[in-house]
Amino acid sequence: MANRVIAGVMPVDIFTADGQTLICTAEMLTKEGIQIGSEADDVRGGDANHLIAKYYHNSKFTVQLQSATFSLEYLALKVGGNISVAAQIEDTEEVTVATQGKIKVSHTPVAGVGTSIIGFYKYPSESNDAWKSITINASTKEATAEVNVGDVVCVKYFHDEESARKLVIPANIIPSRVLIVGRVPQFAVSEVGVDASAKTQIGEMQIKVPTLALDPAGNLEVTSAGHATLDINGEALVCYENSCSGKGYYAVLTERTYEGDMLDNAQGIFVVNSNNDDVTAGEKVQLKVMANYGGLTMPCEIPASKLTFVSKDQAVATVNASGEVTAVGAGDTNIEVTATSKPSLSAIANVEVIAGH
């Protein structure tokens, strides 16, 4: 089997902690995006204070992402704030003077700070230091200014915008928790030293961190050449989801092979209930078949749809396509189980049937 390697930049999706809302996307460099570790203390004893064991503690799983596409939702999670709809905005509009000495704006003005409704105007040809202040009447939307009929001026003022959204950055910043899922490309490389990027992608490695506590520190980068981005850093919190043992975890790594089969890397198969003694005629037994992968990969149950079942003596017992054995008559027989897509993988289950009382 060809070596499998992961390479390249990992795209990462960032969700709210409940997984219901996609907040933003980011990228992770596989070389430096994840740090895993724990501290170790010596356990010693005996006359010479021998090293007996190691005590591991203070484990951690940290994540560093780059180039997160900005969204107001993400920033709200990062600072622990809330977003509200309908907000006050500063607007700039171009106004053609219709009444001598009067400038009329299109929206109802509001006070930017304090109670006075102040605006500013200048002619388009003037520099940015030429803005002059005006007081705008909220009822008429008009302001008195040194302008003539037909003049075109630029006006800055504040007004309420019903479609605008507002995030207030709290002074007490407590970042929220998020769920992240990353996918790094996987390639097949048949020999050491071959450039993985020149090979065809055969799958991906997915990394899921159910609970990432965001670091409140970060930079919002805005450039003239591209979209605004944020750096995202955080530390995984322990998760006890679906765990009866009480042993928590930080993240889940899943290897996905495109167009692959669960038996591709299996070293063998075996029947869990391979010895079925003293089965009474008419009784039924459901066979459970597992794949064995060796190494650190745990055995996995194989769906009956991927297996072929054959009884060596149907007068003793029969078996259907689902692996259900029915005892027929007294005797001893074997049920042969074969992986349909990989016939070299096979196993035997013995059935001993006794006559019914």
Image (tube, rainbow, N blue to C red):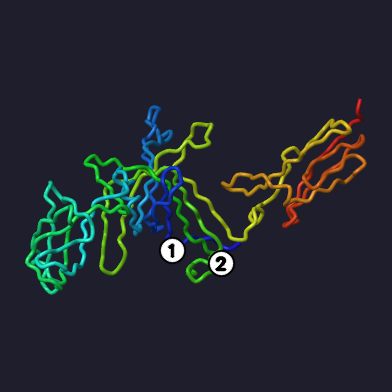
Residue at screen point 19% across, 61% down: 105
Q: In this view, does 253 lie to the left or right of 152?
A: right
Camera-nearest label, 1 or 2: 1
Where residue 8 is drawn, which disc sits there? Answer: 1
Residue at screen point 43% across, 59% down: 10
**Which corner quadrant of the image does residue 61 belong to?**
top left
Residue highlighted by disc 2: 190
At which x and y percent is residue 287? 76, 40
Q: Residues within 10 Å of mark 2 (few under 14, many from 20)?
A: few
* Nearer to the camera, 119 or 139: 139
At which x and y percent is residue 117? 13, 52
Q: How many marks?
A: 2
At which x and y percent is residue 167? 28, 48
- Mark 1 or mark 2: whose residue is earlier in sequence: 1
Tag 2 secondary structure: loop
Measured Cα–Cα span from mark 1 to mark 2? 18 Å
At which x and y percent is residue 243? 52, 35
Residue at screen point 38% across, 36% down: 57
Task: State whether residue 157 is above or below residue 284.
Answer: below
Where residue 42 is drawn, which disc sits there? Answer: none
Q: Is residue 328 left or right of residue 176?
A: right
Q: Which amino acid does label 2 sit on?
A: Ser
Return the residue found at the far front: 99
Return the residue found at the far left: 146
